[in-house]
Amino acid sequence: MMRWIKIPLWLKKCTPNLVWDIPQTERVVYLTFDDGPTPEITPWVLETLAAYHFKATFFLIGNNLAQYPDIAQSLIKEGHGIGNHTYHHRNSWKTSRVAYLEDIKACTTSMETHLGRTPLLFRPPYGKLKLGQPQQLRSHNIIPVMWDILTYDWDVNTTPEDCLKSITKNVQPGSIIVFHDSKKAFGNLKKVLPKALAYLKAQGYRGEILPKSDL
C-alpha cells in the first residue's frame, strides 16, 4: 500500500475540490486532530497547545461528541476550530453515497446540539472519498479538507522519531498537518507533539485554525 507522508503536488492539482494546504507567505501552519473528543487525551492536547500558544482545528466524530460534550465545549472556549469527521467514522468506500451524507449530517446535528455551531469543514475518515463526492459535498456547503503532511501517529510501526521527522523534513508555510487525539495514537502523540511544537516555534511558525472561507 502506498504510504505518502508529504502529499505530492500532482495529486493536489488533480483534485481541486479538496483542500490539501493553504498557500501562505507567512510562517503559518494548520495543526489538525482527528477522531476526538477523547477523555484524558484531548484535554492533554489542549494543555500542550496552550503551553506553546498554538491553535488547532479538531475534526470531531459525532458519536464521541455526544458522549463527551464538555470536552468539545472546551475546544471552543480555548479558541480552537472544529470540523466534521462523520458521526460513526464512516469509510466512504464501504458506504452508500446517501448513507454517507446522512452520517455527515448527523455529526453536524450533534455539533449544533452540543456546541451551537454548524461546521463547514469536513475531513473524510481514512482520507477516502468516491469519485464525484467532493463536488457533491461542496453542493451541500461542506468543504472537504485533507492534508499536506500525515504523521502516521496511529500506526504501531511508526516510531515517535519518524512522526517528528515527517514534520521537520516536510513542513512549509500553509501546511495542514494531521495528528489524532485518539487512544490508538497517544503512544506516539504524547512523545511527538511537544517536540513538534517546540520545533515549529523555534522555526518561527505559528499555529492557526483553518479558515472557513476561500477554500
Image: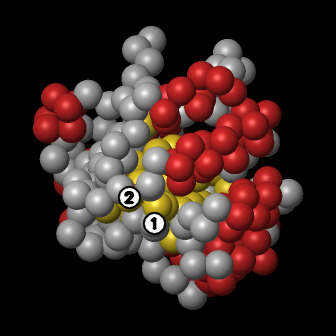
Q: Which residue is tagged 1?
A: 208
Residue type, numbered disc 1: Glu
Q: Nearer the viewer, residue 34 or 160?
A: 160
Image location (x, y in percent) of residue 97: 36, 48
**Residue 168 picture location, percent across and down:** 48, 33
Report which quarter residue 98 is drawn in. bottom left
Quadrant in which the C terminus appears? bottom left
Residue visible at 46% across and 61% down in the picture: 206
Left or right, residue 23 beside residue 104: left
The answer to which of marks 1 and 2 sits earlier in the sequence is 2
Helix, strand or loop under label 2: strand
Foreground residue, 62 or 213?
213
Assess disc 2: are there few (<14), some (14-19) or many (≥20) residues with their C-alpha within 10 Å of its C-alpha. Answer: many
Categorize mark 1 by other alpha carbons within 10 Å: few (<14), some (14-19), many (20+): many
Q: State the residue position of label 2.
A: 28
Q: Residue furthest right?
A: 40
The amino acid at mark 2 is Val
| Image point (35%, 56%), residue name | 27
Q: CA distance from mark 1 to mark 2?
A: 7 Å
Q: Picture coordinates of residue 178 (x, y %)? A: 51, 44
